[in-house]
Amino acid sequence: MASNQRKVAITGATGYMGRALTTQLVARGHDVRALIRPGSRHRVIAGAEPVTLDLFNVSELARALWDRDTVVHLVGTAHPNPSKAEEFRRVDLPAARACIAAAARNGLPHFVYVSVAHPAPVMQAYIATRVDAERELAKTGLTATILRPWYVLGPGHRWPVVLKPFYAVAQLIPGMRAGAQRLNLVTLEQMVDALVEAVEHPPRDGAGRILEVPQIRRTRAH
């Protein structure tokens, strides 16, 4: 049982990161509501409350968030790569804007957003949509935690493991160290731990915090 029980809503709760996070939050005794698209109810983790809605509709989202103290926004394009730039603009950014607007309408106490590490030499369209969403969130004045992973290793998401030797060498070179640390790899377990810790220990009212890759890699949910 978690020492700090929360009423959490998760968008993207049936996805790669969302299912793992939902599993951990339910196991730790939190009241979890999965905000899902039609047809995905069967993928909701047992113990979470499924709510089917239009994830781009601010009014529907606001109704689903009315009694929550935390929202974790995870909706995004699966397996992002440079060829999906249009999908980032069509799906990722509008979904983030809708969730942010709904949370602001309700004065939600804590907004948790998974962004992306930046600057970086690739994935410019993906980074641009996430940075735009961060700006939208900042404008609301909501208390927020923003996590900035680069790539999250896990089942079906392992190809960058071949880059580990590069990261090890780059961190030994002073001019490359900071960039290598900011764009390092995190595991799904590390990411979920960081999200759980963020949910259970929100920043003080009105404050915001940003967790970059080094902080994500060090976090352990207690």
Image: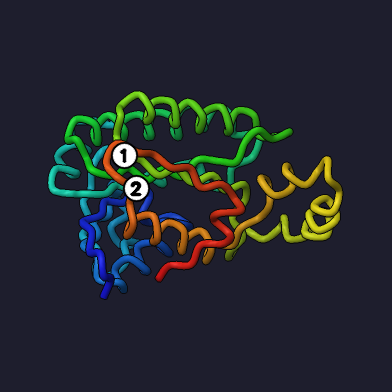
Residue 146: quadrant of the picture: top left
Relative placement, left or right, of 61 versus 157 is: left
| Residue 75 placement (x, y as % from top left) | 41, 43
Q: Is residue 181 above or below residue 191?
A: above
Q: Is residue 110 above or below residue 194?
A: above
Q: Which is nearer the eye, 6 or 85?
A: 6
| Residue 79 placement (x, y as % from top left) | 58, 47
- Which amino acid, mark 1? Thr
State the SS at label 1. Answer: loop
Distance from disc 1 to disc 2, alpha carbons, whole Å, reads 7 Å
Q: Residue at x 78, y 54 (%)?
A: 167
Q: Which mark is residue 50?
A: none
Residue 96: quadrant of the picture: top left
**Which quarter of the rendered picture does the N terminus lie within?**
bottom left
Q: Is residue 190 visible?
A: yes
Relative placement, left or right, of 88 versus 32 is: right
**Which quarter of the rendered picture does the C terminus lie within?**
bottom left
Q: Which is nearer the eye, 10 or 2?
A: 2
Relative placement, left or right, of 136 versus 182 is: left
Q: Which mark is residue 143?
A: 1
The residue tagged 2 is 203
State the SS at label 2. Answer: loop
Q: Which is nearer the eye, 16 or 137?
A: 137
Q: How many marks?
A: 2
| Residue 110 placement (x, y as % from top left) | 29, 44
- Do the residues bearing badges 1 and 2 touch, measured as CB atoms within 8 Å? yes
User: Tag 2: Cα neighbours inside 10 Å, few (<14), some, or many (≥20)?
Assistant: some
| Residue 219 placement (x, y as % from top left) | 51, 62
Q: Is residue 75 visible?
A: no
